[in-house]
Image (cartoon, helix red, strand yellow):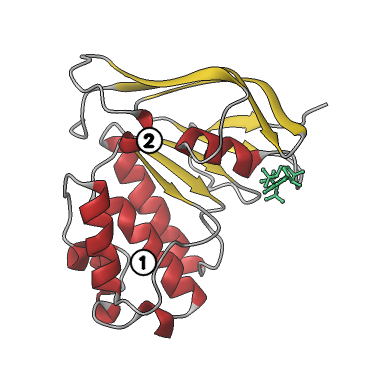
């Protein structure tokens, strides 16, 4: 394990409102190093809301969240120790793939792979100097996912990670996820299409 100390994500009694409505209430979740959890459930049940709340994009109505490190040397806020890849890729169309990844590096800090190496892992090195606006939906998605590799952060939050990816790119993503988990990382994915990795923890929202 070389990402950082061993980590443990603890979510207790989390409630989140969207507008006037409480969308998530009383959510408890624990996730340790090298664990992947998949959040599933019907449309509108609150999967994206859960990930966005953990990422710090939505205020909590109540509850607590922390990423506890076994040797608690690093007290950086949770939002600085995670990567979030949502429905929107967050890429700037006028900038090249390299420039987009360099921005990511600047914001996210602690470099791991260069933009070129990260794109190579997603077999997309040939688009390095192309504006992202020239890319297909699946290629853009792969650039967004390459961000995961340019800065080292223990917790990955991926919303529908397989969207727009062809079969080969899905296999590449799975390899990257397995590598991340193997390095001691944690991952929470909201999805209607499970990655199918062994040992995945299932978190079903809206279960009756
Ligand atoms: N900006 C918003 N303002 C108010 N309500 C919202 C907003 N965004 C989402 N919601 C509501 O919050 C609820 C949960 O939405 P969310 O996107 O988390 O669901 P989801 O489980 O991810 O759905 P899907 O499977 O369709 O992606 C939905 O009822 C939705 O209408």
Categorize mark 1 by other alpha carbons within 10 Å: few (<14), some (14-19), many (20+): many
Number of numbered markers:
2
60 left or right, relative to 25: left
* Percent position of residue 105, x then y: 22, 55
Looking at the picture, how far across and down is residue 66, in whole percent?
41, 20
Say above or below: 82 vs 85. above
Q: Quadrant of residue 9?
A: top left
Q: Is mark 1 within 8 Å of ligand 1?
A: no
Q: Which residue is mark 1?
A: 143
Of the pair 122 and 160, the residue shown nearer to us:
160
Quarter of the rendering occupied by the N terminus? top left
Q: Residue at x 34, y 51 (%)?
A: 176
Q: Earlier in the sequence, mark 1 or mark 2?
A: 2
Residue at the image point whose x is 37% and y is 35% from the top: 79
Left/right of residue 23 with respect to residue 179 in the rendered view: right
- Name the mark on residue 79: 2
* 168 or 114: nearer the viewer: 114
Residue positioned 55% across, 57% down in the render: 87
Q: Residues within 10 Å of mark 2 (few under 14, many from 20)?
A: some
- Residue extending farthest to the front is 20
126 or 84, nearer to the observer:
84
Q: Specify the quadrant that holds the C terminus.
A: top right
Residue 13 in the image, given as x and y percentages of width and height? 61, 16
Q: In this rendering, is residue 13 above or below 199?
A: above
Residue 10 makes an appearance in the image = no
Q: Secondary structure at mark 1?
A: helix
The answer to whether residue 151 is above or below residue 144 is above
Mark whose residue sits in front, 1 or 2 = 2
Residue 6 location, quadrant: top left
């Amino acid at each position: 394990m070389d990402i950082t100390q061993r980590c443990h994500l603890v979510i207790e009694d989390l409630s989140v409102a969207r507008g006037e409505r409480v969308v998530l209430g009383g959510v408890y979740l624990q996730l340790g190093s090298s664990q992947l959890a998949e959040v599933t459930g019907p449309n509108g049940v609150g999967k994206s809301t859960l990930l966005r709340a953990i990422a710090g994009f939505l205020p909590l109505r109540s509850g607590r969240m922390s990423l506890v490190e076994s040797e608690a040397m690093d007290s950086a806020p949770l939002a600085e120790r995670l990567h979030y890849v949502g429905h929107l890729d967050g890429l700037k169309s006028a900038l090249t793939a390299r420039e987009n990844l360099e921005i990511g590096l600047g914001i996210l800090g602690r470099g791991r792979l260069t933009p070129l190496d990260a794109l190579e892992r997603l077999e997309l090195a040939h688009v390095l100097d192309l504006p992202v606006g020239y890319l297909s939906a699946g290629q853009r998605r792969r650039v967004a996912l390459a961000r995961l590799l340019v800065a080292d952060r223990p917790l990955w939050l991926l919303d529908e990670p397989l969207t727009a990816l062809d079969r080969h790119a899905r296999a590449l993503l799975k390899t990257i996820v397995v590598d991340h988990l193997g390095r001691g990382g944690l991952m929470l994915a909201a999805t209607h299409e499970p990655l199918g990795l062994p040992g995945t923890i299932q978190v079903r929202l809206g279960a009756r």
